[in-house]
Image (cartoon, rainbow, N blue to C red):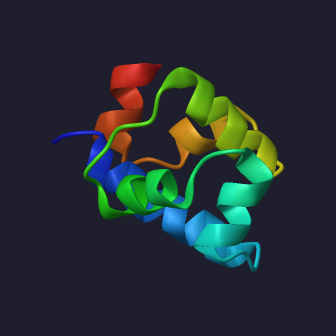
Amino acid sequence: MTFAKPFGDMLKEKRKLRGLSQMGLAMKSGRSLRCIQYLEAGTQEPTLSTLYAIAHALDLRVMDLIEALPEELNDMYN
């Protein structure tokens, strides 16, 4: 299993739970709309700086994002 698709699905869920549009998350995180779109589509993996920016924009810790991934991926990063 690759990281990009599950991360994208989780990111979309977390974003929607906070009532943010893709543009809203892009603005809060300082990333481009295209970056958020690619991440959610699972066609791009986030850089470490993007992980931090997104976590901050969603009022989460980076570990909160990693721990929200499927268990088999979570184990790879713990």
Image quadrant assignment for residue 41: bottom left
Res 9 quadrant in image: bottom left
Residue at image position (70%, 37%) is 53
Vertical relation: 4 (above or below) 26 = above
Q: Which residue lies furthest to the right in this view?
A: 59
Q: Judge whether 47 appears above or below 14 on screen.
A: above
Quadrant assignment for the N terminus: top left
Specify whether 39 is left or right of 30. left
* Residue 58 visible in the picture: no
The x and y percentages for residue 10 are: 48, 60
| Residue 51 horizontal/vertical position (percent) | 59, 34
| Observer-nearest of 1 and 54 | 54
48 relative position to 20: left or right: left
Find residue 60 and report its image quarter: top right
User: On the picture, is 10 further left or further right than 42?
Assistant: right
Q: Give the x, y percent position of residue 62.
A: 66, 32
Instruction: Please name the residue shown 55% across and 40% down the image.
Output: 67
Q: Which residue is drawn at 44% across and 36% down?
A: 46
In this rendering, would 55 be left or right of 75? right
Instruction: Return the residue nearer the eye: 70 or 61.
Output: 61
Report the number of discs.
0
**Residue 29, position as x, y percentages in the image:** 72, 47
Q: Is residue 30 visible?
A: yes
